[in-house]
Amino acid sequence: MKKRLFLGCSIILMFLSAAGCSTGKNETESSETKEKSSPVRLMESNEIASMNTIVTQDTASINAQVHVFEGLYSINEENEVVPAVAKKLPEISEDGKTYTIRLRDDAKWSNNEKVTADDFVYAWQRLVSPASQANYMFLLDGTIKNGHEIINDDMDPEKLAVKALDDTTLEVELEKPVPYFTSLLTFPPFFPQNEKFVEKQGKSYGNSSEKILSNGAFVLKNWDQSSMEWDLEKNPDYYDADKINLQKVHVDVIKEAVTAFNLFQSGELDQAEIFGEYVKQNQDNPNLEKVPASRIYYFKMNQKTDGKDTIFANENVRKAVAYATDKEGLVEDVLADGSTASYGYIPKNFVKNPKSGTDFRQDAGDLMKTNQKKAKEYWKKAQDEISDDIKIELLTSDEDDEKKVAEAIQYQLQKALPGLKLEIKSVPLNNSIELTRNSEYELAVGRWGPDYQDPMTYLESLKSGNNTNYESKKYNDLLTKISNDYGTDPEKRWQAMIDAEKVLVEEDAAIVPLYQQTRSLLTNDKLKGMYYPSFGASTIFKYAEYK
């Protein structure tokens, strides 16, 4: 277990675009017949993969987990980190390395046991253990003291420098100052787990609603890993239960925009996410809300499979594909949902320069803009080195709308790069996740949503050991300096992150950023208080109400 595991939110792209339909305001609730006891009906684009927080890797799971479980901190409607199970923000030592966190004494599990500091110690030791094969164990590498050694199987997980001083006091020692550490604790892999319950469930823990304990605002019902629908019911034992207005939320997995739109129109959904033509046709619909997100969709170009170089080990191929991709055409003609073309891996309106307050994207500028002339120049070099005829396989999931996007990409690249044959391979979502995890692909469209509020949540994902098999000493060295040398020098750290992104996207063309997502949501007038953080979960309805 010497390699780092980078999976996280980066999964095969799930698009839901579709052809036209009539528009109009949701009329179902105008009669005000819906009673308070009736569930609010929401949707997810995909199934929940697991409710085991240490193996989190998909948006649907994260969205469910932030309502069913609760960590030390959470994200409020102002996109701020606020206390949750913790009483207040951490006490941080002068050198920035020791965090003392006081827990509230009224947090309970759904079996009526108290949530204690030991529950966090147990969960984090599981997260860092190589035996767990946790998707996000890398978040502990170089952050919490001894994390690196444990991940590389050179030290026992119990040596992780986190300890319970008593039931309500947690002490964490960091390897070095980590500016984003508190925001990291809002992310599900850092949520607590009840040791006695988890050990009793064994490998089945997190696989169904009967195999979890809740400590959050809601309790999950009627769910297992094959479920296409589930329920979230208000947790009466939650410490803040008096402020939780929704009694029940029913969630359906809906993978097609036409279905989501029609269910919203008929009143069977209180919120629907729509794409493509449906967004165009609903521009004047008062129920439509466009929500900018921080998810970046990008080409994953795998450079090795089974230890052997793929076509993308060739830098000229990568740069040809990067320059040939018409990002503007993709967002305007295919997505048509307000998403914007991306010319960098760090999204706009995510983080600001600590000194000047300017946006990262403004400071870093545009990288690798579409340039058909350069694309052909690099493609000719690639053909001279490989062959006049080059075949590439594009991996997608088997949803109809994702295949439409894949077909648009196929058309773009084959038109721009003479001699290219781009074949589309469509498989079920779980299979596509497994294939990318094991680096058994050539080209795929992945997405990365931020786990915490810092550019490193993106940049760290491509450090050596990632599933694109990108290796760069220059890039790795920059990340090391950012992590180890510049923790207390925000200006140097900021510039080093800009430099690292340029190496990744422009100099090496290791990935090709495609677009930054904007979500188009149709929401019932009566559903108030939903909010959409720029990192972590995509939707939070904890304090929402239906009135």
Image: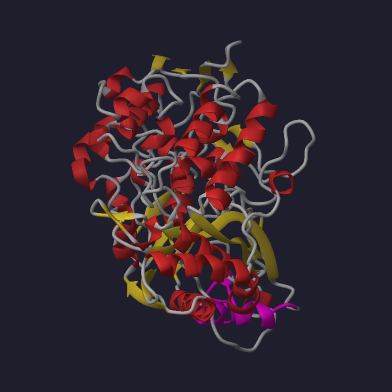
Indicate left or right for 96 with 528 as reference: left
Q: Quadrant of residue 91?
A: top right
Is residue 259 shown in magenta?
A: yes
Q: Quadrant of the N terminus?
A: top left
Residue in view at x 29 percent, y 20 percent: 158
Above or below, comparing residue 485 to residue 54 in the picture:
above
Q: Which residues are magenta?
A: 258-283
Residue in view at x 64 percent, y 42 percent: 76
Indicate left or right for 159 with 139 as reference: left
Residue in view at x 25 percent, y 31 percent: 196
* Percent of width and height locating residue 221: 37, 56
Q: Nearer the viewer, residue 468 or 232?
A: 468
Any part of residue 326 in sight: yes
Above or below, comparing residue 380 to residue 235 in the picture:
below
* Percent of width and height locating residue 92: 58, 16
* Percent of width and height locating residue 114: 39, 28
Outermost right residue: 356
Above or below, comparing residue 529 to residue 388 in the picture:
above
Q: How many marks?
A: 0
Task: Give the colour scheme of this rendering.
Answer: secondary structure
